[in-house]
Amino acid sequence: MIKEAIEKILSLAAPVITTVDDERLYSDKDLIPIIPPHPSALTVSTLDSLAKYIQDNPDRLTEVIICIDGPHQVSVFSPLDETWRNREPYLVAKDTTPQFHFNDCMDVASFIVGVQVHFDDNEARQALLKVVGNITESAVRTHADDGVTQTVTAKAGITRVEDVDVPRILPLAVRRTFYEIGAIPGDFILRLRSAKEGAPTCALFETAARVWEREAVIRIYEYIGAKKFPIPVTLIG
């Protein structure tokens, strides 16, 4: 009891500040800084909105730092505060693009819709949809698979079916981040299999996982870097 009372009295005492090497300050107590308040960062969902905020400069900023946090987020900060050694967040652009579910098996109908929504049209997408859109219920049960390519039974007409080779590598362009930078190209592998009920399922796998993220960051950097701003801007990618 006496020990706790003494510790309480000591905790109420003013902190002792000690200078070491004539420049570094130390305290015998934890000090909590009282930092001047600042508003929360604004949140937008496009790169155009981020650029317009800086161009219109409604908050009369004098300088900003733009940091590309990744393919789905870009932040705008103040320069380093010399007093408190921190940065004030001004705005955050967060991408809200719906994502295609790679590496997951989907039923044929869901897969076709996903491909049409998330991928730009090209020859590879057309070939993919042609194969997947015409496979029969028993297609994957009778397929030939050497680990690289697959052969499935596909409808060639109203009543006729024939064996077709699934494309080995599909060069597709996926819309998976800020719309301003367009679809990111990449190579994908299509795999087919039967579910427990026997219905065929489809899945797309990336041949170089996460490489697209680096390409997206480069595109974001180039997109913002090409903009004209009325104040000094430091762009970090």
Image: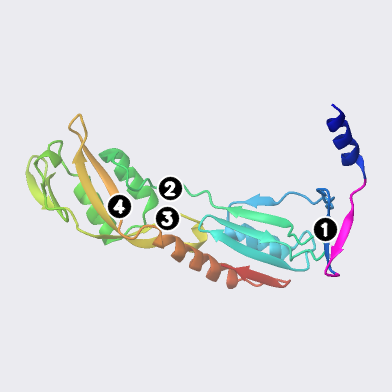
Q: What type is the residue that disc 3 sits on? A: Arg
Structural crowding at the residue carrying mark 1, measured as other residues with C-alpha within 10 Å and reported as few (<14), some (14–19) or many (≥20): few
Q: What type is the residue that disc 1 sits on? A: Tyr
Name the quarter where the C terminus is drawn: bottom right
Please provide percent x and percent y for residue 163. 8, 49
Q: Look at the numbered disc 3 and give the secondary structure of its residue.
A: loop
Q: What type is the residue that disc 4 sits on? A: Phe
Q: Look at the numbered disc 2 and give the secondary structure of its residue.
A: loop
Q: Name which residue lies at 72% across and 73% down.
A: 232
- Mark 4 / mark 2, whichever is N-terminal: 2
- Asked if the residues shown at circle 2 and circle 3 are in contact, with their CB atoms under 8 angstroms apart, the answer is no
Structural crowding at the residue carrying mark 2, measured as other residues with C-alpha within 10 Å and reported as few (<14), some (14–19) or many (≥20): few
What's the distance in space between the residues labelled 2 and 1, CA to CA?
50 Å
Q: Return the residue found at the far top.
A: 1
Q: Nearer the viewer, mark 2 or mark 3?
A: 2
What's the distance in space between the residues labelled 2 and 3, CA to CA?
8 Å
Q: On residue 175, which mark appears?
A: 3
Q: On residue 99, which mark appears?
A: 2
Q: On residue 26, which mark appears?
A: 1
What's the distance in space between the residues labelled 4 and 2, CA to CA?
14 Å
Q: Which of marks 4 and 2 is in front?
A: 4
What's the distance in space between the residues labelled 4 and 3, CA to CA?
16 Å
Q: Look at the numbered disc 1 and give the secondary structure of its residue.
A: strand
What's the distance in space between the residues labelled 1 and 4, CA to CA?
55 Å
